[in-house]
Amino acid sequence: MDEATQSNAALVEESETASHSLKEQAERLRQAVGVFKTAEQMTRGTTGF
C-alpha cells in the first residue's frame, strides 16, 4: 500500500508540472496568435478577448 501511495504522489507531482507547463505554453500561443485580426475585428476595432 505504501508503494502505491508513493507512486500516486509522484504521478500527482508529474501531472502538476505538466499542467503548469501546458498553461505557460497556451499563454505564449495566445500571445503569438493575438497579433492576427479577423476582418470582423478590424471593422469593429475589437480584439476578441
Image: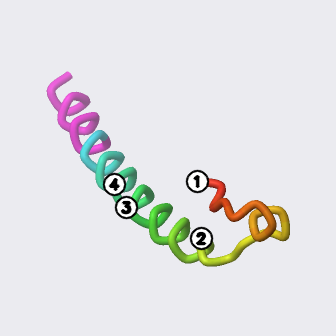
Q: Is residue 47 left or right of residue 37?
A: left
What kind of element bears circle 4? helix
> What's the mark number on residue 21?
3
Q: CA distance from mark 4 to mark 2?
A: 21 Å
> Are dots 4 and 2 in contact, CB under 8 Å?
no
Circle 1 packing at 10 Å, graded few (<14), some (14-19), many (20+), is few
Mark sitting earlier along the chain (4/2) = 4
Position in image of residue 36 (x %, y %) = 68, 76
Q: Amino acid at mark 3?
A: Ser
Residue shown at 22%/37% (left/top)?
A: 9
From the viewer's side, name the closer residue of 5 and 38: 38
4 and 3 marks in contact (CB < 8 Å):
yes
Q: Residue at x 62, y 73 (%)?
A: 33
- Measuring from the top left, give residue 19's x and y in whole percent: 39, 50
Instruction: Provide the residue designation for mark 1.
Output: 49
Seen as rendered, the residue at the extreme top is 1
Marks 2 and 3: which is nearer the front?
A: 2
In percent of the image, x 29 and y 39: which residue is there?
12
Disc 1/disc 4 C-alpha distance (Å): 22 Å
- Is the residue marked by circle 2 packed among few (<14), some (14-19), or many (20+) residues within 10 Å? few
Along the viewing direction, whichever of 14 and 34 lies nearer the viewer? 34
Q: How is the image coloured?
A: rainbow
| Residue under the point 30% across and 54% down | 17
- Looking at the picture, which amino acid does disc 1 mark? Phe
Q: The N terminus is located in which quarter? A: top left
Looking at the rendering, which quadrant does residue 40 occupy? bottom right
Circle 4 is placed at which residue position?
A: 20
Label 4 Cα crowd, 10 Å radius (few <14 / some 14-19 / many 20+)? few
